[in-house]
Image: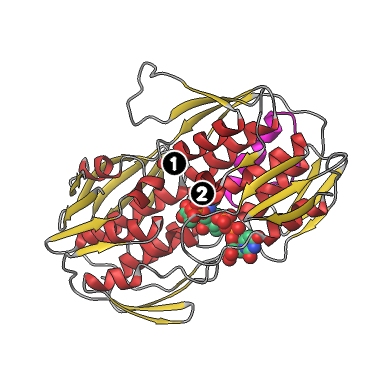
Amino acid sequence: MDRIHIVGGAKLHGVIPISGAKNAALPLMIASLLTGETLELANVPRLADITALLRILGNHGVDHMVVGKRPGQTTETGQTIRLTASNVIDTTAPYDLVSTMRASFWVIAPLLARFGEARVSMPGGCAIGTRPVDLLLMAMEQLGATIEIDGGYVVARTKNGLRGGEIHFPKVTVGGTHVALMAAVLANGTTVIENAAREPEVVDLAACLTKMGARIQGAGTPRIVVEGVSRLNGTRHEVLPDRIETGTYAMAVAMTGGDVTLENTRADLLHSALDILATTGTEVTPTADGIRVRRNGAGVAAVDVTTDPFPGFPTDLQAQFMALMTRARGQSHIRETIFENRFMHVQELARLGARIRLEGDLAVVEGVDRLKGAPVMATDLRASVSLVIAGLAAEGETIINRVYHLDRGFEALEAKLGRCGAEIRRERA
Ligand SMILES: CC(=O)N[C@H]1[C@@H](OP(=O)(O)OP(=O)(O)OC[C@H]2O[C@@H](n3ccc(=O)[nH]c3=O)[C@H](O)[C@@H]2O)O[C@H](CO)[C@@H](O)[C@@H]1O
Ligand SMILES: C=C(OP(=O)(O)O)C(=O)O
């Protein structure tokens, strides 16, 4: 298995291009199942999760074509993928394809809405909690689907098509909102989604569905109203920038010191995280097409953080922020409110010399003067990249194992950091 070697100590200077958002690209690709016409998606990142989803869609019968390189593009410019679901031959998503990735479960909604049935294995994804799908099933039931669990598969059916209904989520769920939207757009009548997720990726999906002919109002607010239509058309859509990748590199710069411009991204996608970063003493300045992040001289101040649904501080940046706080001046309290088991990075950060105490959903981080490199591994995507951030500031060599987690969500990580002066390389197995 590949490993990443980092020799810490270098400050980061330069430009990092931000890729399209994994967590927007995945539901957008899944939305291709809603129409027989071609959906063209631009700015799709080159990631293991994207390849895995192409395999799942291909198994349903969706054709895909990756558009070739165009003038001005590099191998790191987001790819353009054309997806055509004109000939869906299989409405089952099997265990071996679905078990590695949470988002793959969401194919259940467009398959049900367009073909009246779907058989999808219970999902996998990052090991950060129990991650039930009860609210996703509830959403489909509210639109008239019958749901059965059979041999580890969820079987969803509707006899005469879905009908509009009221969906009230008792807690904010991103996946639940994606599923509700993709089911409701082809339902007969009006659907109201209450306590909907407001994440930018939900807004991006709604924008694309609207271009496909869907009638959606209120995306980005807690109340979304969908008027069902009988069919959708193809369109072209550009995936929005990855706010988690943006925040991750911003925290890396705050950790090492230096001056880096994050290109092709938007500060409004992660205001809460950038505000917190600014209070640590890091300079954060929005630019015409990105964000400049600078920290010189003094170290970082300890700041408390609580994760929350958007527009709050994202859980997907909690591990990275904790890495930053390991070297802050003083004590930081980090509360995780979204997932019950998202502290798997704590014991690995401790290998580098971090001092962190867990009290239920609270991590108390005592900043230390220095971290020292060590071999580490993590069990999920964002935890893995928190170890990269810590390794960039640790003395000596850090070796990160289980790199396949990083490859799920960070495009060209070593190249992006290496060009800014980090001593980082991949050892291929
Ligand atoms: C591919 C993708 O976009 N993944 C993101 C998505 O995951 P995902 O969509 O899985 O996360 P949710 O927003 O659904 O989960 C939020 C909370 O709701 C709970 N819940 C969810 C569904 C359900 O049926 N029942 C239930 O209890 C979850 O266990 C969790 O405690 O949003 C999370 C929260 O921002 C992010 O960390 C993930 O990176
Ligand atoms: C938790 C994540 O992914 P998934 O939902 O696919 O596990 C993530 O992107 O941080």
The spot of residue 287 in percent (x, y) is: 40, 41
Using the image, determine if residue 353 lies above or below residue 23: below
The spot of residue 51 in percent (x, y) is: 45, 36
Using the image, determine if residue 91 lies above or below residue 7: above
Q: Secondary structure at mark 1?
A: loop
Quadrant of the drawing holding the C terminus: top left
Q: Is residue 108 left or right of residue 40?
A: right
Q: Which residue is mark 1?
A: 265
Q: Amino acid at mark 2?
A: Leu
Tell me which residue sits at (47%, 40%) in the image: 52
The spot of residue 258 in percent (x, y) is: 23, 52
Q: Is residue 320 left or right of residue 401?
A: right
Tell me which residue sits at (54%, 71%) in the image: 337
- The disc label shown at residue 163, or none: none
Q: Which residue is mark 2?
A: 269
Q: Amino acid at mark 1?
A: Thr
Residue placed most toward the observer, 392 or 81: 81
State yes or no: discs 2 and 1 in contact (Cβ < 8 Å): yes
Single out the residue that lies furthest toward the front.
151
**Residue 215 makes an appearance in the image:** no
- In this rendering, the count of numbered labels is 2
Does the stretch in magenta take in 209?
A: yes
Tell me which residue sits at (82%, 30%) in the image: 230
Mark 2: give few (<14), some (14-19) or many (20+) Cα within 10 Å. many
Mark 1 vs ligand 2: CB under 8 Å? no
Does the stretch in magenta take in 92?
A: no
Mark 2 vs ligand 1: CB under 8 Å? no
Task: Determine the CA span between mark 2 and mark 1.
Answer: 8 Å
Q: Which region of the structure is painted magenta?
A: 198-220
